[in-house]
Image (spheres, helix red, strand yellow):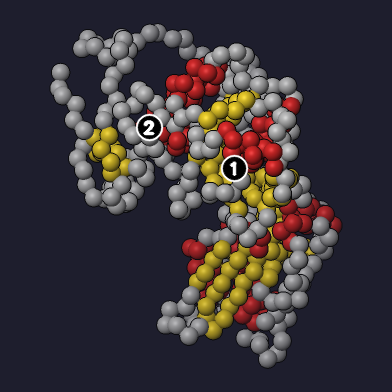
């Protein structure tokens, strides 16, 4: 039998090479390859011996048949249950990531305490903090009386053996997966091979026992969950905890969910007693906005199944640099470049000698192209000095030809705007799902030139372009 040689694994993406090299070809990261021993074949497994592997015959089923909805374990935290699709599914595995100190452990401790107080067995395994540190956090949050079973352990085999004692736990939290290690994997803790092997062992326990398991994952400097991407494919749901230190609220976003809608968000506010739910995030994002300043437009967006209103702020200022500056917070930089090119080409605006700053107020990150119209309105308003109507909302996608294209779920956007007291909506000329408009006055635009002309007519004469 041929001797197994060493392999080199990229610690950023998990790509495997048979020789060392300075740069990973898969992800482009330098000096990320680490030598790791190959896993030996499991004794007694099919194909482990030199003989030919033989499989077993299993039954095949058709598409037609009776199905049952997956049972749910409701945590009692409405925003968390919304993102997970209505609660935790027994036997499912969730991966949650976020920046250090964002509140991942705080949220999970609250969920564990709520389930434990309802009479379910809950186990919290910490690989980063001691049990004393976890108890102090629970005491600050007023949750020290909750019957949560706590342990500080990093060996996967010991964790699985301990969980098998007594009744099956309803929820198991592993904080975090990067600190776990398995004796069956010949690699240092924290490496890609260890993370993948530890996650596989924990997922196998969850699937065979029916316990719901939450894995906490570290994130890289660009916000991606650290470790091999294969772990994200192995789990049933991937949740991202977002927020900034300057803002008190946090956003839990579902990036993948086999049992619910993706891109669903839950909004929380950080308080001295932990995270509190925000039932009306639109009112929070619009609180304190300056209605008398140019360069601000209210965007009626959709996050998952929830309509959310948020303020888009733009500042267009003359530049003294050879290359104008483009700074974006909460939106895609490439999308801003496209909107600027359309406004300059089809709208007749001269933006090549101006710095452009764009910000989504409140720290929310907007991903849908329906924000194009609100961004364009804010940019034109800042450039011309025109003040947009404070009682109006904007939504619509801008094509490269300058046409304003319709977007989905217009009726829900209009209803949310009407509920918050807005009176008018500026939207694409096409589209037939606006319903009755939610009682709002609808103004439709078919091309970006119409939008520019409408805003320029409101500009002070000294600033008109």
Q: On the image, numbered disc 2 is attached to which residue? A: 194
- Secondary structure beneath dot 1 equals helix
Residue displayed at 72% across by 45% down:
273
| Image vertical order of residue 133 relative to residue 165, above or below | below
State whether residue 352 appears in this view: yes
Residue 111's place in the image compared with 356, above or below, is above
Q: Nearer the viewer, residue 433 or 253?
A: 253
Residue 463's label in the rendered image is none
Q: Which residue is mark 1?
A: 104
Neighbourhood count class around disc 2 (C-alpha, 10 Å): few under 14, some 14–19, many 20 upward = many
Distance between the alpha carbons at the discs numbered 2 and 1: 22 Å
**Is residue 404 visible to us here?**
no
On the image, the x and y values in percent for residue 231 come to 44, 34
Residue 17, percent from left and from top: 24, 39
- Exactly how many numbered labels are in the figure? 2
User: As drawn, which residue projects farthest toward the bottom?
Assistant: 462
In terms of image quadrants, where is residue 450?
A: bottom right
Q: Is residue 260 above or below residue 346?
A: above
Of residues 113 and 441, which is closer to you in this image? 113
Question: Is 450 or 53 nearer to us in this picture?
Answer: 53
Q: Residue at x 67, y 37 (%)?
A: 138
| Nearer-N-terminus badge (2/1) | 1
Residue at the image position 53 percent from the left and 22 percent from the top: 206
Q: Is residue 265 above or below residue 464?
A: above
Q: Residue at x 53, y 49 (%)?
A: 99
Nearer-the-camera pick, 152 or 31? 152
Residue 79 in percent (x, y) is at: 70, 41
> Picture quarter containing residue 56?
top left
Percent coordinates x, y for residue 225 in the rendering = 47, 44
Secondary structure under the numbered disc 2 in the rendered image: helix
Which corner quadrant holds the N terminus?
A: top left
């Amino acid at each position: 039998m041929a001797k197994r040689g060493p392999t080199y694994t990229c610690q950023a993406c998990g790509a495997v090479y048979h020789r060392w090299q300075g740069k990973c070809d898969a992800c482009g990261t330098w000096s990320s390859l680490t030598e790791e021993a190959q896993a030996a074949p499991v004794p007694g497994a099919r194909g482990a011996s030199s003989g030919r592997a033989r499989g077993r015959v299993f039954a095949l089923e058709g598409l037609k048949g009776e199905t049952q909805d997956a049972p749910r374990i409701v945590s009692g935290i409405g925003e968390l249950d919304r993102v997970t699709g209505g609660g935790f599914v027994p036997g499912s595995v969730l991966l949650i990531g976020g920046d250090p100190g964002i509140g991942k452990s705080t949220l999970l401790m609250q969920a564990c305490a709520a389930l434990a107080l309802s009479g379910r067995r809950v186990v919290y395994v910490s690989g980063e903090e001691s049990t004393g540190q976890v108890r102090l956090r629970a005491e600050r949050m007023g949750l020290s009386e909750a019957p949560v079973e706590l342990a500080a352990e990093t060996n996967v085999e010991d964790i699985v053996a301990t969980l098998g004692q007594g009744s099956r736990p309803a929820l198991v939290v592993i904080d975090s997966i990067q600190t776990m290690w398995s004796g069956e994997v010949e690699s240092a803790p924290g490496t890609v091979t260890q993370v993948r092997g530890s996650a596989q062992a924990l997922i196998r326990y969850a699937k065979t026992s029916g316990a719901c398991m939450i894995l906490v994952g570290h994130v890289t400097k660009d916000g991606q969950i650290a470790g091999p991407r294969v772990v994200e494919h192995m789990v049933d749901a991937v949740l991202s905890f977002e927020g900034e230190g300057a803002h008190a609220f946090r956003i839990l976003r579902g990036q993948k969910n086999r049992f619910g809608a993706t891109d669903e968000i839950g909004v929380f506010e950080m308080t001295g007693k932990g995270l509190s739910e925000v039932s009306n995030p639109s009112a929070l994002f619009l609180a304190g906005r300056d209605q008398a300043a140019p360069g601000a437009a209210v965007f009626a967006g959709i996050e998952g199944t929830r309509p959310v209103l948020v303020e888009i702020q733009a500042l267009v200022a003359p530049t003294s640099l050879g290359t104008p500056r483009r700074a974006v917070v909460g939106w895609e930089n490439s999308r801003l470049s496209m909107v600027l090119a359309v406004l300059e080409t089809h709208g007749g605006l001269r933006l090549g000698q101006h710095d452009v700053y764009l910000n989504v107020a409140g720290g929310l990150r907007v991903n849908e192209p329906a924000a194009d119209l609100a961004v364009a309105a804010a940019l034109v308003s800042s450039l011309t000095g025109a003040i947009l109507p404070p009682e109006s909302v904007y939504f619509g996608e801008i094509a490269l030809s300058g046409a304003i294209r319709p977007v989905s779920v217009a009726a829900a956007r209009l209803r949310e705007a009407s509920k918050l007291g807005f009176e008018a909506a500026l939207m694409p000329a096409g589209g037939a799902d606006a319903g009755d408009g939610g009682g709002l006055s609808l103004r439709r635009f078919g091309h970006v030139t119409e939008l520019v002309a409408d805003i320029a007519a409101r500009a002070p004469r000294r600033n008109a372009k």
